[in-house]
Image (cartoon, rainbow, N blue to C red):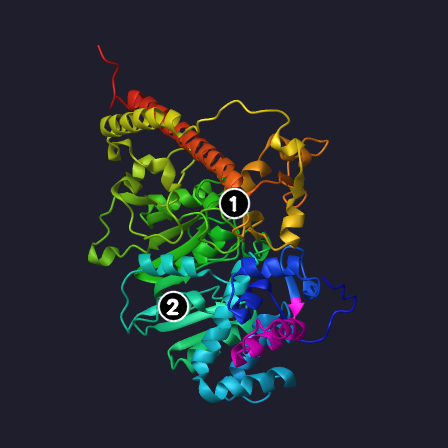
Amino acid sequence: MTENAAAPVGPMVTGSEIARMAGVTRAAVSNWRRRYDDFPAPSGGAVNSPLYALADVQAWLDKQRKGQEVSPEVELWQAMRAAYGEQMVTGLAQAAGVLAGKRGSGLPREVANRLRKPARTEAPVDLLDGLVERFMDSARRAGSDQVTSARVVRAVRHFAPELTSAATVFDPACGIGTLLLSVSAAAGARCRGQEIDADSARLTQLRAGLAGRSQVSVEAGDSLRADAWPDVRADLVVCDPPTGATDWGRDALLLDARWELGTPSKAEGELAWLQHAYAHTRPGGQVLMVMPASVAYRKAGRRIRAELVRRGIVRQVVALPPGTAASHSLPIHLWCLRRPDTAVGTDTDHTVRMIDLTGNSPDSGLEPRPEQVADVPLIELLGESVDLTPGSHMRSRHRDFPGEYAALSAELEDRVRRLAALLPELAPGGAPGPLDGASTSVADLARAGLVAFDDQEPVSVSDQLDTDYLQGFLRSSANVRRSTTSSGTFRLDARGARVPRMGIDEQRRYGSSFRALSEFEKETRAVQELSRRLAGIARDGLATGALAPRM
């Protein structure tokens, strides 16, 4: 690669965006970086997420005849990223102002010029939605919690009640409006929101205006310290609040009337947001609150959780799958509250529905299976810890211990029977071994164009090289020792590893055996996991009385 000491001026692109420009995969772009000495050097970003000058990349793609014409939308996005960097919400708000016909937007000239071309052919709301979507995707890939992820929005919409056009929806920490606008979209309900970041609040208001939603009104400001909507009593409050914040204003708000369930501690800012949301519900109104899983069991919040249970306010807690949030892989909960409406005598529930989806994929359906649901009596929740973690309350009655034990036993017996058949037939070999003779490094194979790296795993891209043969020798003890440091840390040095020189027919013979060994190892791991599950079912079945020793 070429070294470029001075960072160029102008838009920059990621490896993913280069792939989209060229119509190839990200792995192909990674391969170009290694194979071509003249591929542009990174001009910014981090080691694991480098950025490249758009002009340099386009020139290189044109020279290699790999490029495609860059769309006006891509050029606009790159110009905005160059102009705003980490302040992209400001740029989106200013662009939205121009699209809405507002004067004095403050948009830089380069960005304004790039905006004019797509604005001539696209509806303003569609153009802005496309920019917001790019921003959300970049925030997700960066692990940012700046926006509510699409998966969280999908979960809230799934568990939200049906709304009418006469309903009021409120979000006291609405960010750029993704959750508020999405949940209320179908009904066209009246929306009220507040957001501490002025640019985000302005962007939300302009998004609603461009979409023709005149019933949306968003204010800027700190919801806890300066509530802009003290008189709003909503049918539904949705909120994905800031997490882990200790400076939420507790000292100034000790006597606030919103803490009807108890004054939150400094470390329980999420429970302050929850009570703020609850204070804005009418009788019978509901709250859907995105919460870190730890809020369900932390000692400091026990008293407030007890009041939520005792008064019949908390109706459902859903443990969402890991990966639902954009910024981390830890599970989060969705707390579903309802303000009692004793005037109509509808509050007869004496249980809290617990739904545990933590074993599901974040992109799978949100309808729970029977064994993932438990209706827990309030009295069972009012113990010493008042633990509202759904997984802690899944009832053993959902499980067919005898059926599961019999099925897993039969599966284990079948897998063990097939395990030995997977081992390849191997004969005594001669000395020296293949790696003691003529060999070549993976780096040399890559330079020759025979190897590409797919997520750091080398694969053959030539009919002169067998992938199973290549990867089998890479996992040999000789190459493993080469990749192990003096402190014992193992890190595969694929490029420095060596493989023996063989003809393709001989490679395939070795590759077949290596492939069989990989299948054997895979099946062994499956047997180990199956054994663990079987032992757990047997132990729990014996402890609950669902299983008993044979006489």
- What residue is at 28 percent from the left and 31 percent from the top? 396
- What residue is at 50 percent from the left and 38 percent from the top? 511
Camera-side residue: 158 or 26? 26
**Magenta span dominant secondary structure:** helix
Q: Where is residue 155 in the image (x, y as percent from the top left)?
A: 37, 56
Magenta residues (range): 52-79
Q: Mark 1 points at which residue?
A: 467
2 or 1: tag closer to the N-terminus: 2
Q: Mark 2 points at which residue?
A: 182
In the rendered view, would you say 284 is above or below 466? below
Can I make out residue 256 in this image?
Answer: yes
Secondary element at tag 1: helix
5 in the magenta segment: no
- What residue is at 25 percent from the left and 21 percent from the top? 547
Left-right relation of 38 to 477: right
Camera-side residue: 452 or 396? 452
Q: In which quarter of the image is the N terminus?
A: bottom right
Residue type indicated by callout 1:
Thr
Q: Is disc 1 surrounded by few (<14), some (14 to 19) or many (20+) residues within 10 Å?
A: some
Q: Where is residue 385 in the image (x, y as percent from the top left)?
A: 43, 35
72 in the magenta segment: yes
Residue type indicated by callout 2:
Ser
Left-right relation of 413 to 3: left
